Amino acid sequence: MRFTRRRPNMDFGKLLALAVPASLAAAVGCFSSDEADLAVPPPPVSDASSDGGSSVGHDAGESPDPTSDAGFGDVEPLPIECASPPCATALVTTFPGRYGVTGEGFCAVLADGTVACWGANHSGQLGRGEAGASVFSSSTPERVLGLERIVELEHMCALDEDGAVWCWGYAPLLRDTEWWMPTVERTPVRLDLPPAAHVGFAPSVGCIATRDGALLCWGSNDTGQLPTTGQQYQFFGVTEIELPPGPPIRRIAVGNATFFIREDGSALSVGAGQAIARLSSLFNDPNPGRIELDGVRALDVVDTNVCATARGVGYCWGDKLPGALDAYGRAFPRGLVLPEPIVDIATTPVFTKVDGEDIPFRWCAVSVSGAVYCWGFNRNGQAGTGTKEYVNDAARVVGLPAPAVSVKTTLSTTCALLTTGKVYCWGGNYDGQLGNGQTRGMALVPEEVILP
């Protein structure tokens, strides 16, 4: 079984030193050098698989202009070739839980069109029905009840071949109420919506691009992440959204800001000012505006932290990093430096608390060659370096048996979908999020998920 994507035609060995778009240079240049260093993920890249873990150098003289790249679509993931089922074709994270309850988990679309989930289940994230209500967490992936012929998955909401949208767990379901808080559904519920082409969901917001070209959104507008003229914190039922003229939407990503990525790789944003990646006079801006990145392929938003890939270049922005003096020092996209172009990127909340302790950032990215790089918080081995030491410089994950197609991160765990259709995870396992059939413990190197 083969899932074909065009392979990139690029020199994998060439080091890319990536720059901020020229139109943002003036704004970025206003920050002091100390603040700028804090606002950019560490530029050196080390290969954890090498003997010394030495850093790869950075030659600014070889920096290409990202806007002069060959064009959107030239940098894509490697194809998935399923030689031995079961295999996955897509990978996502689940939502943490209701009323601030923490919990980590993952779901995958399987090659037969079903969906399997593992990890935390206190808010119905696993979709196993009422019979599974007593299962607080599970390290054994099982299929979500009633889902089939799934073509797109966003957290705990799925889109099937007919355009029907199904959601379960802690998700923004459509209700005849003005109370915006999502409810818990342990079995997928079909939403009363027209046939959809693409979906995007956060715990309190949902959006779809319909097959006839309309854009519909609903839910809470607490950070202006619904592109409406309504008041902040107001609940909205299904509302048709007007975007500036342009190509069709091919991806919707929702957090404290909402991003609409078009077929040509341009992207528009609304929502929290720290996350929308553009200048605005509003603290929370519900008016759609274009972000100054071209050729956007992948984008991951968690709360107010955002990362994207554009023509093989990685960019991150959002919340200030621990120790930064300027709260808006990361308000604009800033380029990452990696040894080769990247096709996927994943992030976690930049600044959170675990057991009362402030926990800093963490990121992972997949390159065109299928290598996975991670850096940041690593107390449970989630950076994949084989240790639990904090990773200052992006390091190549060791122990993956095949190249990766995509990567997803939670605070404690990382999972990657490989070209073989297998999923490997590493890091913490207190919710069973490693999917290895074992409870508790951790994995300092990647372990295979036992897909059903």
Image (cartoon, rainbow, N blue to C red):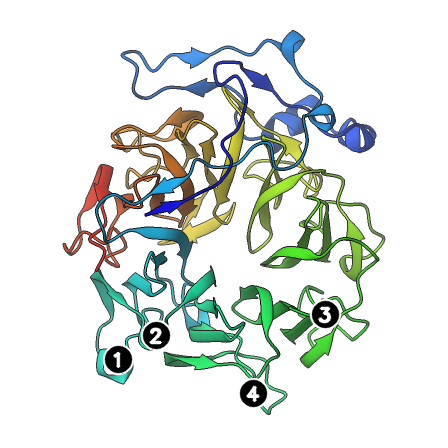
What residue sits right under mark 1 in the picture?
133
Q: In this rendered view, identify the residue nearer to me: 116 or 435.
A: 116
What kind of residue is marked 1? Ala
Label 3's element? loop
Q: Is residue 240 left or right of residue 245?
A: left
Label 2's element? loop
Q: Quadrant of residue 448?
A: top left
What residue sits right under mark 2 in the picture?
124
Q: CA distance from mark 1 to mark 4?
A: 22 Å
Furthest residue to the bottom? Answer: 176
Which one is earlier in the sequence, the residue at label 3 or at label 4? Answer: 4
Q: In this rendered view, identify the residue nearer to me: 106 or 51.
A: 106
- Residue 365: x and y in percent read 46, 35
Label 1's element? loop
In the displayed structure, 57 sits above or below 184; it is: above
Residue 175 is labelled as 4
In the displayed structure, 376 sits above or below 302; it is: above
**Pointers 4 and 2 in contact (C-beta within 8 Å):** no
What residue sits right under mark 3 in the picture?
214
Q: Is residue 192 left or right of residue 65?
A: left
Label 4's element? loop
In the displayed structure, 440 sits above or below 402; it is: below
Q: CA distance from mark 3 to mark 2?
A: 30 Å
Furthest residue to the left? Answer: 438
Does residue 324 appear in this view? Answer: yes
**Pointers 2 and 1 in contact (C-beta within 8 Å):** yes
Nearest to viewer (mark 3 / mark 2): 3
Q: Is residue 291 left or right of residue 110?
A: right
